[in-house]
Amino acid sequence: MSTPRLPAHAGRRIALAGAAALTATLALAAPAAAHAEVEADKAQALAENVTLSFVSEAESDSAGFTELRVVLPKGIAPGDVTLDEAPKGWKLKATNDGYAVSGPALKAGVDAEHKIKVRQLPDAKEIAFKTIETYSDGEVSRWIELPTGGAKSEQPAPLLELKAAAPGAKPVSPSPSPTETASATPSAAASTPSAAPAQNDASAAASDTAADEDDGMSSGIVVGVVVLLLLLGGGAWWLVKRRTASSEN
């Protein structure tokens, strides 16, 4: 018996349906493209002097990146970060919760890449670096969502998985905060108490001198009064004696 042939149009439909199903399967199997990601040369908890590399993929066809602001995870202070590499003319500035790198606008369609050096990574299994991207036309993209319950995030924050800490690894002492640094530096207010005794001593010496002068003046006045009284007394006695002599004559 011969196998019945399918009509040509039916064969084309089956082929198209199969291609569509294959495309859907591949799309589901492929990982979602990351628009902001981070990598480390030593992705290990408590690792020191680690270089982190960040890539922000350009999404705009008409504007380029001008700034990337990164929120640091718990355990990394803004003072623990230094800039290693960045686009030409871009500089790093510490913020309250992380840092920002910014500079002349990049060309439209050009990804923004930069590297930072971190003093030490925290003791964690995974850390997130929330990233806010700003374009030259004012557009802002926020890659700040964290995974919750295995649900897929539409704008996920860059995540870095860390290996367990090396045996014997310990957290280094935290970097001094601006307040601590300022308090460690002698200030005018701090030096005022030490200057105050000198001023008090000078004032006391001046008071003693004035008192001595007052005592001297008082003694001089007393002596003058006594001399004056003696002179007056002597004059009176002389007048009385003269009058007495005149009466006798």
Image (spheres, grey):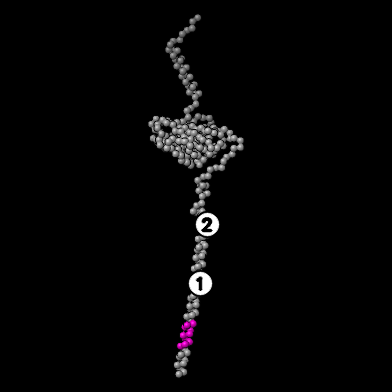
Where is 1 relative to 67, above or below? above
Where is 104 relative to 6, above or below? below
Whether 247 is among the magenta residues is no
- Amino acid at dot 2: Ser
Spot occupied by residue 41 in the image (x, y as percentages of width and height): 53, 33
Spot occupied by residue 237 in the image (x, y as percentages of width and height): 48, 87
Measured in 3D between alpha carbons, the distance from the residue under mark 1 to the one under mark 2, in whole angstroms, is: 32 Å
The quarter in which the C terminus is drawn is: bottom left
Seen at 52% across and 38% down, the residue is 118
Seen at 53% across and 30% down, the residue is 150
Write down the quadrant of residue 243 in the picture: bottom left
- Amino acid at dot 1: Asp
Q: Residue furthest right?
A: 168
Seen at 50% across and 52% down, the residue is 187
- At mark 1, the secondary structure is helix
Observer able to see residue 116? yes
Spot occupied by residue 145 in the image (x, y as percentages of width and height): 49, 33
> Which residue is more in the foreground, 51 or 122?
51
Observer able to see residue 130? no
Seen at 49% across and 7% down, the residue is 3
**In terms of secondary structure, what is the magenta stretch mainly?**
helix
Q: Mark 2 packing: few (<14 Cα in 10 Å), some, or many (20+)? A: few
Q: Tell me the residue that label 1 is attached to.
A: 215
Q: Mark 1 packing: few (<14 Cα in 10 Å), some, or many (20+)? A: few
Where is 27 relative to 248, above or below? above
Query: Pointer 1 and pointer 2: residues touching (CB < 8 Å)?
Result: no
> Which residue is more in the foreground, 100 or 18?
100
Q: Tell me the residue that label 2 is attached to.
A: 194
Residue numbers of the magenta segment: 230-239
